[in-house]
Image (cartoon, rainbow, N blue to C red):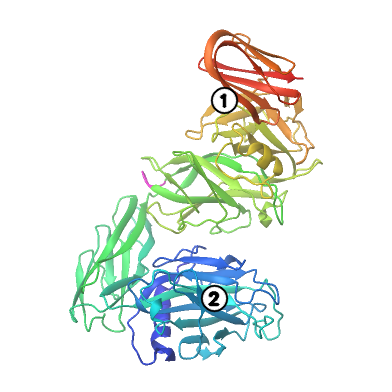
Amino acid sequence: MMKNYIKTFVLAFALIAGIGFISGRAFAQVTITLWTFEGDVTTPETGSGTANLIGGTEATFAKGFSGGRGWNSTKYPDQGTGSGTAGVEFLVSTSGYSNISVTWHGRHSNTSANRLRVKYTLDGVEWEDFEADDSNATNEVEGVGKGFDNGRFIADAGDTWFTRGVDFSGIPEAANNAAFGIRIVSEFLDGSAYAPASPTGTYGSGGTLRYDDVTFLGSGSAPLIAATPSNLSGFTYVEGEGPSDPLTTILTAFNLTPASGMVTITPQASYEYSIGGGDFTGEPASFAYENGVFPGNGEVPVTIRLKAGLPAGSYAEVLAVTGGGAQPLQVSLSGSVSTANPPVISGYILPRFIEGATPSNQNRLPFAFRATLSNLLPSSTYRYYNKIISGTDGETYNGAGNCIFVNSATEEFTRTTSTSLTTPGQYGEFTTDANGSYSGWFITEPTGNARFKPGNEIFMRIMLNDGAGGTTEATRLTISEGVKILGFYTHAADSTGTAVRGISTSSPKNFVFIYDNAGGNGRPLYGTHVETSGINFIAGTYAAFYAEDVAGTDGAWGGIIPNNNAAGVRLIEERSIATGNVIASYTSENGDWHGVNTVNPTGGIDNVLVINTTLGIDNKPAEAFGKIFSYGNLISVSLRQPVTGVMEIISLQGKVAIRKSFSGSDFNVTTELPAGIYIVRIVSDRGQITGKVMLK
């Protein structure tokens, strides 16, 4: 949902221009930075800056002041502790601006603290208390003032939105300051204890303080033209049906020179605009200003849309605003024209099972599937993220779970615990081919969300932007076949599973599918990637066996298989990260892998099934290549021809204990390894040989 930006700006301007703390001065102010939290992100809608949590608080997103979204902070200090230390922080450079002020909407829950303090910094290090009162701040609910207490904002009701603002024009150092910022923190009522926002409530650390429309404003002596918002995305229509729905930005200005003149708006080829509700045009046009500002109330609404009649494709352009001695302004525009056929998931390889646990999940495993997306814009770069949904979730729900993004071109893996199409690192990217198609890998990390309850059926959903630089979800694609959630248990049921991991010579960052049949028919039991991937999979979040024996070990992989599985694991495929093609495969006729029986397992998480495909199914080395044998703690290799390569001695847990380079046909290695069974693998310029030895 897009907020009403006109309403937001007018409100912020009215707070600064209309309340008593201006002391009769009329500052022409513009938005420096604006947070609306749309798309569940903490990146600004306009301008630049950072929003942070401080003092141990945590935050989610919830309904905002006028619809849309808000930033909902919680986990405040326990009663009697941490006064003035916990809350939210906003850092914004005010370079080039004076007469700084900040406005926001804030909502108290019933059990949140009823006293809030604004702090400010002039150097990014030291923080000072702002002493708020009726002369320099506002604190209202629907126009009714709620007052201040010893420089702090008062809340006299819970579940209520307050309109608040502070004026820093009396602090000259706040102007033109690259290190400026504010904090909004909870404080004790009487010096020793917090009091609740609701007079009939009780303070609790789980109370919430929600923020929306956080706006930094300023003026200056130099000519300035600004736009709120300064970028617009989501212009879209189906080929042959245009134009797109319009979006509006508000132009403001101050100190234009000469005092009276003209400002010119110039679009690029694919967009057209309307000034103040007039006719749309794709040609440059000018309008007059007087006394250094725009006419009327100082605001000029400009409505923009993507032209009709454009061919399918993505359109990233700018609308230029020039004149009045100000630096040229460019409003970024992004949109797309799609083909008549809607985007679809035209093909996929989707495993049947995924790990899950609620209400918390400390045994997570990465779950991978491969999908082909079609009917997208040709040769276009899309932002995306993938999640899971339940069968009852709506068409616009973005899903649960974490993402591990796979860039097949660079072979980079990126894990994130939050997703948005705005913040780098919180979305993945791919580029379609000339036909508008893309095939790639998608990894989901199950969390403790209620949808990951063992026994549930979930569905894979992929969110896409418009393929033209947009930062909102333009398309949601869902695979109609479900995935069953398994928990780690030792009894047989349709919701129980056992841990499995592999020791292999597979290339790191490729992918593995495991099947219950030797032909690879139907859907795999499980799918995952081959380590080492570069992701830090830590115990306590991920299953201990995965964190300790899989993560960081080349060729290792891990997963979960159902306890109800009479066929066991009969096929393991290694597939290329780049193409998805099968590179290698290993089969077992009966589900037994060198004494590891995968038929109807009951190991849960403690008795992990270890499948070692480095041994080969017949458990014999390649006799035509040579042989490997041991005596005591001596390992001997005798090959039928001289080679150059590397010998690795590997424990049954998949760890490489010794790695040595060699050249020749016969050599010996004396070890100091503990007695036991080890795998010896030789990789050379002439081929590979693997054998199992016993050290004494």
Q: Quadrant of the C terminus?
A: top right
Which residue occupies 56% across, 66% down? 53
Q: Neighbour class for label 2 at 10 Å: few (<14), some, many (≥20)?
A: some
Q: Viewer-proximal residue, 330 or 390?
A: 330
Q: Neighbour class for label 1 at 10 Å: few (<14), some, many (≥20)?
A: few
Q: Which mark is residue 184?
A: 2
Q: Viewer-proximal residue, 404 or 563?
A: 404
Magenta span: chief secondary structure? loop
Q: Viewer-proximal residue, 85 or 593?
A: 85
Report x, y in % for residue 600: 78, 34
Report x, y in % for residue 71: 54, 69
Q: Which mark is residue 410?
A: none
Residue farthest top in this picture: 640
Which residue occupies 44% across, 78% down? 102
State the SS at label 1: strand
Please tell me whether residue 160 belongs to the stretch shown in magenta: no
Q: Amino acid at mark 2?
A: Ile
Discs 1, 2 touching: Cβ within 8 Å: no
Residue to which mark 1 is pinned = 584
Choose the circle earlier in sequence order: 1 or 2: 2
- What are the residue bounds of the magenta stretch? 376-380
Q: Amino acid at mark 1?
A: Ala
Q: How many marks?
A: 2
**In this image, 655 relative to 404: left or right?**
right
Can I make out residue 342 in this image? no
Establish if 92 lies above or below 487: below
Report x, y in % for residue 298: 30, 81
